[in-house]
Amino acid sequence: MTKKIAILPGDGIGQEIVAEAVKVLEVLRDDFGLSIEMEDGLVGGAAYDATGTPLPEATLALAKAADAVLLGAVGGYKWESLPIAVRPEKGLLGLRAELGLFANLRPAILYPQLASASTLKPEVVSGLDIMIVRELTGGIYFGQPRGIRVLENGERQGYNTLVYKESEVSRIGKVAFDIAMKRNKRVCSVDKANVLECTEMWREVMIEEAKAYPEIQLSHMYVDNASMQLVRAPKQFDVMVTTNMFGDILSDCAAMLTGSIGMLPSASLDANSKGMYEPIHGSAPDIAGKDLANPLATILSVAMMLRYTLDAPEMAERIEAAVNKVLDEGVRTGDIWTEGCTKVGTAGMGDAVVAAMRA
Ligand code: IPM
Ligand code: MG
């Protein structure tokens, strides 16, 4: 059966990197028999400019009807002074919420070829393979009440609410434990249980949920320590599971262990493995339109789509093998370039991956 993929490039470098990922999908369709249909939609600042909202009804309908969504990035200087309710980021958050994509998988894998591109010593990062499981539709990102109010003395006060229901914690815990069962069976739950009641409960629910997984070795870490451990000795981690905001922060940190934030893909899944796939990096308006961005995180997000939603693991492997080959050949975008390698632009990298897939 033909699968429908909604293509939402968004803003900034989103346009360029998604174009390269689409080339990869086209090769799978045209040369390898992947049965897909692609349809473009507007999201983020681009959607705001065209329609006055960062998540138009048509885009939401397209995403809901699709089997999978490929997203680039949203946001940019141009929209920074807009009220939060119509900021480009709301388009992305709205998609996550409306599609029920509560489980965000962010694998931080170091390609051995890039060991010297990391700012950390090669021996600290070589062989790195961490899966960060980030809760994506709850926590402080969505908690009510929220806003900016004026106090009696005329001073303004900004406020947000960190909330989790037990069921939200147990379902993300289950995702993390299931993933760990296919890996090294170790899960580190990251919280701030020494200060925040919400995450005190988070920890209790994790412990309870883990009882159904006797083989899993569950540990707990406060988020401040976890951020330190990620740069001190990252290989101690197998699967990390954490809240929406902590996961946002820790995944950027983990990305740099791999050499560049331009290397990290992600999958955001609902309860039925329908997913939205996007690089973890942002729209990088400073380099947008200059053919400088690294498209590999987006291309590797397509591999995750093939594995988690489209049930075509052999096609995912084809992409990953092609990326490996291109890196072996020394082809690099600027962010991962080191002495002696060949520097290419966004399109050059996409073309190299496509050529390797066909070879
Ligand atoms: C991410 C991004 C988003 C987030 C922004 C763009 C809303 O930083 O996917 O990590 O905070 O979740
Ligand atoms: Mg982020």
Image (spheres, rainbow, N blue to C red):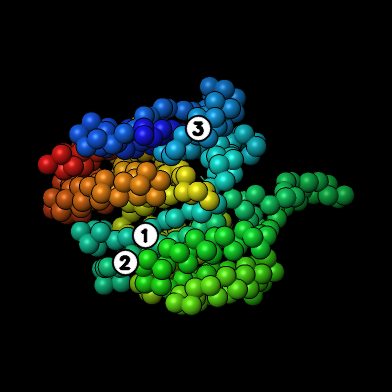
Determine which quarter of the picture holds residue 91: top right
Q: What element carries label 3?
A: helix
Instruction: Answer left or right for 275 relative to 329.
Output: right
Q: Name the residue under label 3.
A: 65
Q: Name the residue under label 2.
A: 128
Circle nearer the N terminus (2, 3): 3
Determine which quarter of the picture holds residue 255: bottom left
Asked if residue 78 is positioned above or below residue 180 in the image, the reply reads: above
Asked if residue 357 is positioned above or below residue 79 in the image, the reply reads: below
Q: Which residue is drawn at 50% across and 48% down?
A: 272
Task: Return the residue nearer the eye: 341 or 180.
Answer: 180
Task: Please identify the residue farthest to the top as the structure is shown.
Answer: 50
Q: How crowded is mark 2: few (under 14 residues within 10 Å), some or many (20 or more)?
A: many
Task: Return the residue nearer the eye: 311 or 206.
Answer: 311
Residue 54 appearing in the image = no
Determine which quarter of the picture holds residue 73: top left
Q: Residue at x 25, y 49 (%)?
A: 314
**In the image, residue 356 lies at what x, y percent?**
16, 43
Residue 176 appearing in the image = yes
Q: What element carries label 1?
A: strand
Q: From the image, which quarter does the C terminus lie in?
A: top left
Asked if residue 47 is positioned above or below residue 151 in the image, the reply reads: above
Disc 2 to disc 1, C-alpha distance: 7 Å
**In the image, residue 290 lies at what x, y percent?**
32, 34
Instruction: Answer left or right for 229 relative to 159.
Output: left
Q: Which residue is drawn at 63% across and 56% down?
A: 139
Task: Return the residue nearer the eye: 243 or 178.
Answer: 178
Q: What residue type is labelled 3?
A: Ala
Marks 2 and 3 in Cβ contact (< 8 Å): no
